[in-house]
Amino acid sequence: MKVNSTYIVDVVDDDINGNGIARIDNFVIFISSALKGEKLKIEITNIKKRYATAKIIEIIKSSNDRINIKCSKYKDCGGCSFLHINNNYEDKIKINYINKLFNINENKIYSDSEYNYRNKATFHVNNNIIGYYSENSHKIVSFDKCLLLDERINNIYNYFKNIDLKDINEVIVRTTKSDIMISIKSNNKIFDYNDLLKYYNINSIYLNNKLIYGEKYIIENINDKKYVIFPDAFFQVNRENMIIMYDIVKLFASKGDKLLDLYCGTGTIGIYLSDNYNSILGIDINNSSIECANINASINMLNNIKFIAGDSKIAKTDNYDTIIVDPPRVGLSKEVINYINNSKCKKIIYISCNPNTLKKDLELLNNYSLEDLKIINMFNKTKHVECVSLLKYRS
Ligand SMILES: C[S@@+](CC[C@H](N)C(=O)[O-])C[C@H]1O[C@@H](n2cnc3c(N)ncnc32)[C@H](O)[C@@H]1O
């Protein structure tokens, strides 16, 4: 087999990265944007020791689950692995992947949004061109509109596309249901925003981390609670699926006396559960998120919730009824694993945006067994999938 050689193959499986899998003389070939059941003419693009990668040259027999790709930049960008697949089949691939990984038999994936769900985008600038970084590189990909973004973010992106960007390095746009925030990194200490304000209802503009227009933060309303968001504070990017996820967490957590919310971000989960527990402590390493969390507790008039800025490993054993962890993609640190194993806490809720580190951490949390796991398609059209797992203490 050689790079650039072509073959006719039958696709026998799909993977979580949006590839179809075929075999040539038992050698595995991952074919970008292919689907199980398809017959394809492919060209080999790379050969490794145990597998090769390929691209489609011609679709000889197409899958019924294939749909027209609605984005002309999807190959350059690389952010959406499932744009060629209908939503039901994407769900099926993600459910199968999680079931196999955890040896479970879930048949549902929760989601409330297919497109236009992202409330945050980071645009980079190079040579006066603004766009996303292409996957695994710093090549700028510009586009007309990104199918995943809130339309207000697409419109603001198009505004920036049409101005002189020579001093600008980065533009971050965040939205809530009612508000818009823009944070700009620039070599210039001045940014003329008057034109921008003529066209868009912007609530807050930061330049090089300094507020230059409007409010210090934007506000998201969910049910009867308000949440403030500073430019560099964490907030879930898909509001509708976040609510679905928090409702699952609420169901798993039910009611109790003491709750510990590790990796709490802006305190959203603790605040969402504040009616169900007598006292709640949230810990997060990001000072700006904790500043938001404290404002959130105050504007929602909650006095049963406290937040501490620091590493989750500073948590102390305090007879918690429930511990929630929602770490970044790398998963839990050794110290947090030890802390939980020794905590004797009856119930752990582990929220994860990386099923592989969740799997590894569940094996290390050997005082706990997996009781339930719900799958959320938090990031439709991408290869990512979110899990909420309920662990019970092995007494
Ligand atoms: C996936 S977010 C979870 C946020 C929150 N649970 C929510 O739903 O909005 C992960 C959070 O972990 C925080 N973080 C990362 N490393 C940490 C550490 N070592 N200790 C505490 N927090 C950490 C980040 O600042 C981020 O807010």
Image (tube, grey):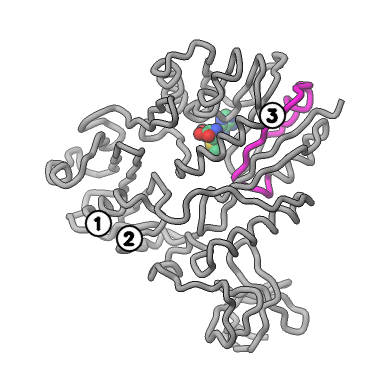
Please give the count of numbered marks on the rendered protein. 3
Q: Quadrant of ligand 1?
A: top right
Give me the disc on residue 336.
3
Tell me if 71 is positioned left or right of 276 in this view. left
N-terminal-most mark, 2 or 1: 2
The image position of residue 241, as x and y in percent, is: 51, 44
Quadrant containing the C terminus in the rendered view: top right
* Viewer-closest of 344 and 238: 238
Does the Cβ of the disc 3 residue fall within 8 Å of ligand 1?
A: yes
Disc 3 versus disc 1: nearer the observer: 1
Q: Which residue is mark 2?
A: 145
The residue closer to the viewer here, 331 or 169, is 331
CB-based contact (under 8 Å), mark 2 and mark 1? yes
Classify mark 3: helix, strand or loop.
helix
Residue sitting nearer the eye, 289 or 368: 368
**Residue at the extreme right:** 395
Q: Which residue is mark 1?
A: 158
User: Which of the 4 image quadrants contains residue 189?
Assistant: top left
Camera-nearest label, 3 or 2: 2
Residue 118, compared with residue 81, is above or below; it is above
Magenta range: 333-357
Vertical side of 377 occupied by 45: above or below: below
Q: Kindly report the distance in space between the C-alpha atoms of the residues bearing marks 3 and 1.
A: 44 Å
Label 2 and label 1: CA atoms lie apart by: 8 Å
Q: Amino acid at mark 2?
A: Lys
Q: Is residue 2 left or right of residue 131?
A: right
| For marks 3 and 1 on the same chain, the one whose residue lies earlier in the sequence | 1
